Every structure is written in C-alpha cells, then in structure tokens.
Amino acid sequence: MHTLPALLELQGIHENLRIIQRDLTAFPPDMSKLDTELKGILKRQESAAKELGEARTKVGLMAADLKLAQRLEEHAKAAVKQSTHKTQYTAAIRELDERERQKTMVARPLKDLETRISALEKETTELEAKRAQVQTQFDELHQIFIAEHENQVAARGVNQTRRLELEAQLEPATLTRFNKLLQQRQGRAVVAVENSTCGGCRTKLRIPLLAELREKGTIPCEFCQRILFLPPKS
C-alpha cells in the first residue's frame, strides 16, 4: 500500500488539531488569570510535596540519632553516679558534658526540622484548598468558553477520529518515524520537492537522489530527514 496520501492527510490533520488546540486554549483575560494561578499553585504543591518528603525522611534519621545520643547520655549519667574516685568522677563528668553537647547538636536541628515539617503540612493543606477553589472558578468559566466554541470542539472530535483511522493504515515503523519528524520539524514531516529542492530545508537534491525519488515515490531528505515526494505535474 502506498502511504503518501495517508501521510499527507495525517499531516494536515495534525495541523488542524494544532490550530484547534490553540483556539481552545486562547482564554479570555479572566480565565487566563485563573489558569496562570492554577499552574502556580500546582507548581508550588509539587515543590512543597518534594520538600516535605525529603524532610520526613531526614527527620526519621535524625530521630534515630537523637535516641542514640540520649542512650549514651543516660550511660554517662549512670557512670557519674557510680564513680567512687575523684579522677574517675572527673572523667565521667567530662564524658557526660560531651554526651549532652552531642545530644543538643542533634536535638536543635531536629526541632527546627519538625517545625518546618509542620509549616509545610499547613501550607500543603492551604494550597489544596486554594487549588480546589480556583479550579472550581476556572471550570465554571471553561464550560461557558467551550460552549461558545462548540464548532471547534466538534471539529476536534472529527479530526481525532480520522487521525486514528489513518494511523491504523500505516506500518508501526512508518508511523513512529512520521511522529518523530513532526516533533522535530515543527509539524512538517512530509514535504514536496520543487525545482530539485527539498521543501523543508531548501537544500538542492543530488541527481541520484532525484532519480531514486522518481522511482520510489518517497525518500528521506539526506539533510533534514523529512519525507520527500514529487508533486503531480500540472
């Protein structure tokens, strides 16, 4: 099966869908403001969730370190009580001072981190409430907006259905290559050759390539890799 007609039509459908999507996301100022606010909230939610997860992991490790420091401090206190000689007592006091310092070095940042976690949890709750509120406002306006653009919505459905039909006609490898070119070449995967020149990158084709193109019907451009074809002569 010759794939050129399907590829050309599919390329046109992708362009139609791009234009429709542009129209359906060209929000009026009030909706645009809400949309921007929503994106900002979602970005902050993602950042806060990441920070909260990292803080909770860290606080667990620090809590374990604190427990160890507390056990060592208790042992040092017991050693002080059990000391019977002045030299032994002095050494035990020094050990206890060191253990208390170590515990403080762990306890203070742990407390700060727990305070930060509480603040993040509060912020996360507030962000979710704000997101829900803004989302409701946006959805109400969006319903009106979509109703005013019902022709584009209908056209989008028709184009999406036809896109699936055409994609089913193509070999998987051909479709994968076509979609990759669409992304890489700003929506122009298939281009005509005019005056022996690629319609995409404007590079002059070598004579052997032109001969191969006439024989096969389509070939990749050796420079931009777009799918080349010869337009019918008028």
Image (cartoon, helix red, strand yellow):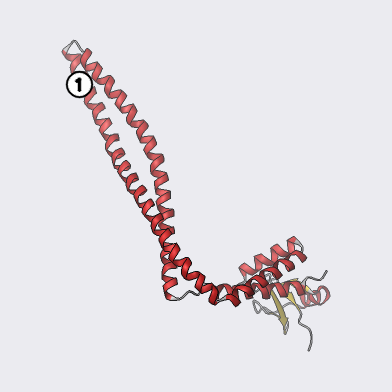
Q: Which of the two residues, 58 or 189, is positioned nearer the viewer here?
A: 58
Q: Which of the two residues, 50 or 189, is positioned nearer the viewer here?
A: 50
What residue sits 54% from the left and 74% below the top? 147
Is residue 16 visible in the rendered image? The answer is yes
Disc 1 target residue: 93
Judge from the rendering whether residue 135 lies leftward or rightward of residue 112; answer left or right: right
Question: Which percent across, then down, holds residue 63?
Answer: 35, 33
Q: Amino acid at mark 1?
A: Ile
Does residue 65 sit above or below 77 in this rendering? below
Question: Which percent across, then down, holds residue 148?
Answer: 53, 77
Dot 1: element: helix
Given the current orientation, which residue lies at the most extreme bottom position?
234
Rendered-image quadrant of the N terminus: bottom right
The quarter of the picture where residue 70 lies is top left
Q: Count neighbours of disc 1 (C-alpha within 10 A) and say few if under 14, some if 14 to 19, many if 20 or more.
A: some
Question: Which percent across, then down, holds residue 217?
Answer: 80, 75
What residue sits 36% from the left and 47% below the top? 121
What residue sits 45% from the left and 76% below the top? 28
The quarter of the picture where residue 131 lies is bottom left
Does residue 84 sit above or below 138 in this rendering? above
Rendered-image quadrant of the C terminus: bottom right
Judge from the rendering whether residue 84 lies leftward or rightward of residue 8; answer left or right: left
Does residue 136 sit above or below 200 in this rendering? above
